Image (cartoon, coloured by chain):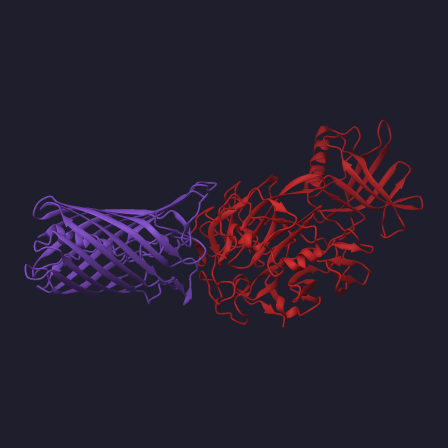
Chain colours: A red, B purple
Amino acid sequence: MQLSRPPFSGRSPLVLLVVFTTLLVLIRTPAVLAQAATLDQNILTLHELKVDSQYFVVELAIIPSSNPLAFSLVDFAELSGPGFENPNRLTGSLLEIPSITVEELSYWVNLRLQEIPDLRLILEDFGLNDDEPTSCMRPEPDPSHGSNNPPIVNGFSVSTEFLFDGGPGQDGIPSIDAPVFERSPRGLDDNQLVVGVKMGDSVRAYPHYVLDWHEVVNDLYTINGETVRHTLSYCPLTGSAMMWKGNLEGQSVAYGTSGLLLNSNLILYDRTTGSLWSQMLEQSINGPSILSIPERVQVIETTWGTWSTMYPESDVLTTFTEYDRPYESYPYGDFRTSEALRFPVENSDDRRLPRKERVVGINVGDTSRVYPINNFGSGVTVLEETVGNRDVVIVGSGSSNFGAIFDRQMEDCSTLEFSAVVNQLPIVMSDNEGNQWDIFGNAVSGPRIGQSLQKTNSYIAYWYAWTAFFPGTTIWE
Amino acid sequence: MLAAMLILMALPDLALSATCSCAGTPLMGALNTTTTEQGDFFLSSTSEYHEISDLVQGSKQIDDETGRDRSSISQALAFSYGLSDRWALSGLLTYIEHEREVGSSFFGSKQRTSGLGDSVLMLRYTPLYITPFSRHELSLGLGARIPTGKNDAGGLITFSEDMQPGTGAAGAIFWARHSLAFNQAATRTLTSSIYYTRNDWENERDYAFGDQIVAAVDFIQNLTTRFSYSAGLRYQHTTADQRLNFEVPNTGGQWLDFSPAINYSLNDDLDVNLSGRIPLDRKLDGAIQFTTSYSYALSLTYGF
């Protein structure tokens, strides 16, 4: 997106249209920015606003259908002191935002304070910052084996050699489209695995014993007052769980099970275009959306014991699913503990680890590496490594049964150094700046409170599945 | 007498599962095992419809809210030729169609596969006949399932094993049947049969179907010289299918079916037979399986 500096008063309708369209992009682009100002949905957050010698954190909301674009004050609080090198400033009635990053481009924005009749700020001017780069924000992780443009053969972006019909047919394994949650689950013991999500004000756990029978949950989350569909998927055959934002080119989208498997891994289909989506590749592999990448949400797979310790107020997905299934039974016999394969997979001879060993893996371009959960040992282990061109931090625990990988480089291009925090779950790491980070990679205390570590293409899966999708992966011993 | 013999042939319905135990395409039900004398030649054509839409957890049928409809239709051409008064050769060629539909599927996709199915060749030995002087008949058979069937249906995306017309692997068949006539004219007989299929071979996708034992008991009565009926019980035990020597979950189990049939001789050479199978009880392995709801078959047999 290239923007020229637009005029704002007495401008032609065409120019205003360009400006308005640009602002719509700004509004609709899900951005999580580490600069002094960030835009998320319709909320503009000024993490630091300098007014004379005082500092404030301010939240502004875009006033719908306003033209010129206007903002109303939502909330503010005084800060104890400065934290950013280049804060936002209010001088007279002019509010200057020196840097806000959208789609990897940095803009400056000027707002004008108007107090009559109501307190509001009007967009006065904005433009592209000249000094590059000002941001190290990562785009959505590209998990496509480092190949952004794989050849499309017979409509597929992947080889069909290990693409099979699983047997049940499309929606033969029914998704849960109206999930019911409860606070105090019955029959869930501490050793059972759950997939945990923390988003907005919601903290939810999706037990494997429900997911084993449905694999896809189309759920709703309320974020900043807006209800947004998200889809959680779990493949029992590869032990991998993902959550994707249910958004396809601006449209809300739900997913279902296609009945197909790639390397024994779930292939979803979207109910808008019918495109097929590989769960572990996190990419559409066939159909109108081919090569599209969903917006992923960090999930944590761990035991109920660990999860409920971290988030005792968590909502838990129940078995009230409208389907008559024997949830007390695991549907695949001894599959998760044996060396059995249910379908042929690529690279099945790679037996460096037991096939069903649970690993947290990361893929960066042509490089991938896995960290067996059991190898993390007791307590909390924090590792700093370079995988491909990414400096990453790996945090895991064998005894508490979790593992996650984040980018060490922040969006402001600084690289943090981490160390483990024990016995303070969900806090698992601290850094050289004095921040503390929870298991989802969110800063919960310190100068970066409210910020998040950048996502990586990483998740937990069975070893055989990981090496099938990412041959040549290395193993942390 | 021919009618009684033909009904013996049709009743045991000894399924050679072309697929997993829950979705078998029965072959042996169509195999002509009519007792033959030297030079006798029988040719039969059988059409069977097999509905496989019951969702069962162990022994309990549970609701399938997905509205799944799964069926198979097999067309079989079978022959039996008397090599001598005691030795006979039977053979079977099949053509299989599978259909699968998930009613609740968002896009309502229906999928079909079809193609040449597996074949069977069996050598039979009959040391004991029902005669005016003997009310017992005993036949033994040894055969093979020949993987002539199409096993890569689906094109780009290969369908699951249960949707393939053929198994893609050979199998060995052991068969025995005993009949007891209650009267000299053999108008009432009790037939017991047992059937064992051994599947030690994997197909190209490293898949091997489970071994299968079928035992059946049938009572047959000729009401007239042209019309007869039968009623019987059929027990089947199938071990789990295997892939790469590991059991495939949710395959295998035990089934008990009621199997009625009627037979009518249109003339001295041509018989028509209608038979069916209704589940009485089942105890299936794994968490859940889709399994037989019912099946029926119509066959015509011509004796040369």
Residue B178 in the figure: left or right of residue A421 = left
**Looking at this rendering, what residue extends furthest in the front direction?**
B182
Residue A221 in the figure: left or right of residue B147 = right
Front residue of A132 and A429? A429
Location of the N terminus of chain A by quadrant is top right
Residue A236 appearing in the image:
yes
**Looking at this rendering, what residue extends furthest in the left direction?**
B132
Residue A279 appearing in the image:
no
Residue A350 in the figure: left or right of residue A112 = left
In terms of image quadrants, where is residue B34? bottom left
Front residue of A201 and A224? A201
Front residue of A373 and A477? A373
In terms of image quadrants, where is residue A321? top right
Image coordinates of residue A194 in percent, x first then y, are 61, 56
Image coordinates of residue A43 in percent, x first then y, are 75, 40
Image coordinates of residue A186 in percent, x first then y, are 60, 52
**Looking at this rendering, what residue extends furthest in the top direction?**
A117
Q: Residue at x 65, y 62 (%)?
A: A403
Residue A9 in the figure: left or right of residue B120 = right
Location of the C terminus of chain A by quadrant is bottom right
Image coordinates of residue B25 in percent, x first then y, are 30, 53
